[in-house]
Image (spheres, grey):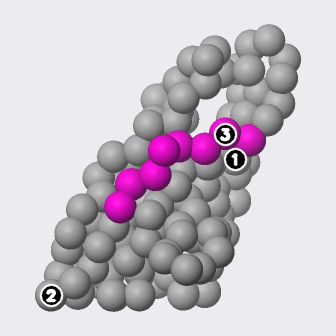
Amino acid sequence: QVQLVESGGGLVQPGGSLRLSCAASGGIRSIYVMAWYRQAPGKERELVARILSGGGITYADSVKGRFTISRDSAKNTVYLQMNSLKPEDTAVYYCNSDLRTVSGQTSKYWGQGTQVTVSS
């Protein structure tokens, strides 16, 4: 069974940095997309960054120049390096992946979420 497990969230002061990790496991044949979304209280979930299997990368305008998404394909792991954090980056961050399982099913999977709080 596919699982996405996130780690690396926490409390950080404005201007600080955090690195999130997300490892996918469990009967995976191919990963097409790995992405990070976030959801702040009272707001809709939004795309933060996405990396395609071919290497294409997309960022939300609000994080361009501050966040960097990367991946280790051998480990089925995606990272989000977050620098120059702002209070408005406070949210639950979710890992997401579009992938194909060994049984041939293609679907979208979500992690459980990790809290990022930016506050002094």
63 or 45, nearer to the observer: 45
Q: Which mark is residue 109?
A: 3
Could you tell me if the residues under marks 2 and 3 are in contact, i.e. CB atoms within 8 Å? no
Dot 3, crowdedness within 10 Å: few (<14), some or many (≥20)? some
| Residue under the point 60% across and 55% down | 35
Q: Answer with mark 2 or mark 3, whichever residue precedes in sequence.
A: 3
Q: Look at the image and tell me in which quarter the N terminus lies.
A: top right
In screen coordinates, is 72 left or right of 109?
left
Q: Quadrant of residue 92?
A: bottom left
> Where does label 2 land, which residue?
120
Residue 7 x, y percent position in the rendering: 33, 46
Residue 2 x, y percent position in the rendering: 61, 24
Residue 56 x, y percent position in the rendering: 69, 59
Q: Is residue 14 above or below residue 115?
A: below
Q: Secondary structure at mark 3?
A: strand
Could you tell me if the residues under marks 2 and 1 are in contact, i.e. CB atoms within 8 Å? no
Marks 1 and 3, how far apart at CA: 10 Å
Amino acid type, label 2 = Ser
Q: Which mark is residue 33?
A: 1
Q: Which mark is residue 115?
A: none
The stretch in magenta equals: 108-115
Amino acid type, label 1 = Val
User: What predominant SS class does the magenta segment belong to?
Assistant: strand
Q: Is residue 82 visible?
A: yes
Q: Answer with mark 1 or mark 3, whichever residue precedes in sequence.
A: 1
- Outermost front residue: 42
